[in-house]
Image (cartoon, helix red, strand yellow):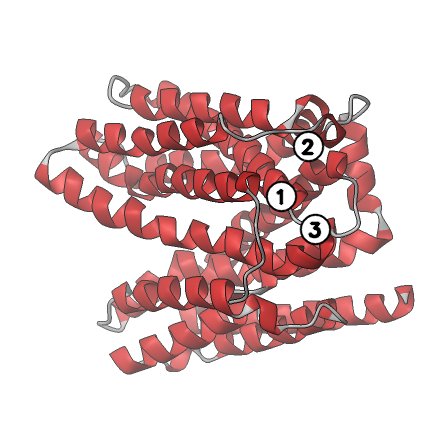
Amino acid sequence: MQNYDFNKNFFLATFSNCFFFVNFSCFFLLPLFLDQTGYSKSDIGIVMSTFGFSSILLTPYTATLIDRYGKKILCLIALALMIASSLCFIFVSDFILIIFLRIIQGAAFSVFFNSSSAIASNNLNDDKKQVGLSFFSSFTIISYFLGPFFSEKIIIQFGFTEFFIYASAFSLMSLILVLFIEERDSERDSTADVLSFFKIIKDENIFNYLFANFLLASGFGVVMNFLSLFLKNNDLTVGYFFISYSVVVSLVRIFFADRFSSKNLFKKVLLMLTLFAATLFFIPYIDSKSDIILFSVLFSLTYSLVYPFLSSIVVTGKSQALTGRLFGALNSSFSIGVNLMTFFYGFIAEIWGFNTMFQVASVLIFLGVGFVFTREGRVV
């Protein structure tokens, strides 16, 4: 990878984001705590989904606050909320209070991720955004190793109190890093309001990118939420997939993002999405460990650069005072794709089985890419 001379603010945003994501990813193991506390599978489903829907519904408001009052101060508020809510699980067992804590965490995630992404972007020149945002997003993948992997061992060895302390400690480290970030007045917009967030989404020049991101998320969600059950039904385990996924996505984003010219970048994204859809179509044919590893590598290669490239396309040439809302729109489209389509695909799996579900997901992404490509041609 070439030397791109990323500045101090960019690195602080990147590593603070990584630490925050460790705290966030630790809570993939929250179902273990809820199960031990005595809650049913349906209760656990409600608790876990509350986070995603909270984040989605609050994004128009939180993204506006980010641009209006500043990315740094909103980062600090979000981190304080994440630390407090993570620690509160030590003392809380009531269902309503647990739901309330997950709502707080969803809001904190919405605020922090959009803020840190905006800070990273604002500290990159337009010609560096493609590779810089790929580098930034690679560290969200690395965090999954520090999160669920070590958290499981802490729970087994010590218990849930230590687990919640471990998780919150990473947001504390993130908060310390954010304190050293320097923000300019030009990165704020005192006139920003919620309506301006929706005006961005209505912009013809951004809808195609948001919809492409939605398509990516729909495929990502169906794999992450259902692959383990599909493999279990075929007497296989999902561990090989996650190991390969983490390694390949991180390496590709760090070392290969600069190999792609920014010319016609969106067309390259659509090609990647097409290949990504093709990998989903062949999931039903996985029947060995080597097949799992091969699928993981192909899935990761086609998936890894789509989100960071879309991010760079969306924010390049835009005002720094607008980046909070731009990332809010981008991340909302991804969250909606994961949550809404996972809900939809769950019904397909229930009626027709996993094989049909994965192939339907593949075909819908193919059709979606065709729709975007047609629209792109009309806009040009």
Q: Nearer the viewer, mark 3 or mark 1?
A: 3
- Residue 280 makes an appearance in the image: yes
Give the labeled residue for mark 3. Answer: 125
The image shows residue 14, relative to residue 346, as above or below, that is above
The CA span between labels 2 and 1 is 9 Å
The quadrant where residue 36 appears: top left
180 horizontally vs 197: left or right: left
Q: Residues within 10 Å of mark 1 (few under 14, many from 20)?
A: many
171 horizontally vs 113: left or right: left
Element carrying mark 1:
helix
Q: Quadrant of the C terminus?
A: bottom right
For badge 3, the amino acid type reads Asn
Residue at the spot 36% in from the left edge and 65% down from the top edge: 247
The CA span between labels 2 and 3 is 26 Å
Element carrying mark 2:
helix
The CA span between labels 3 and 1 is 25 Å
Residue at the spot 79% in from the left edge and 45% down from the top edge: 318
Residue at the spot 65% in from the left edge and 53% down from the top edge: 311
10 horizontally vs 310: left or right: left
Q: Position of residue 302 (x, y in %)?
A: 53, 72
Give the labeled residue for mark 2. Answer: 60
Q: Nearer the viewer, mark 2 or mark 3?
A: 3
The answer to whether the residues at label 2 and label 1 have Cβ atoms under 8 Å apart is yes
106 horizontally vs 158: left or right: right
Element carrying mark 3:
loop
Give the labeled residue for mark 1. Answer: 332
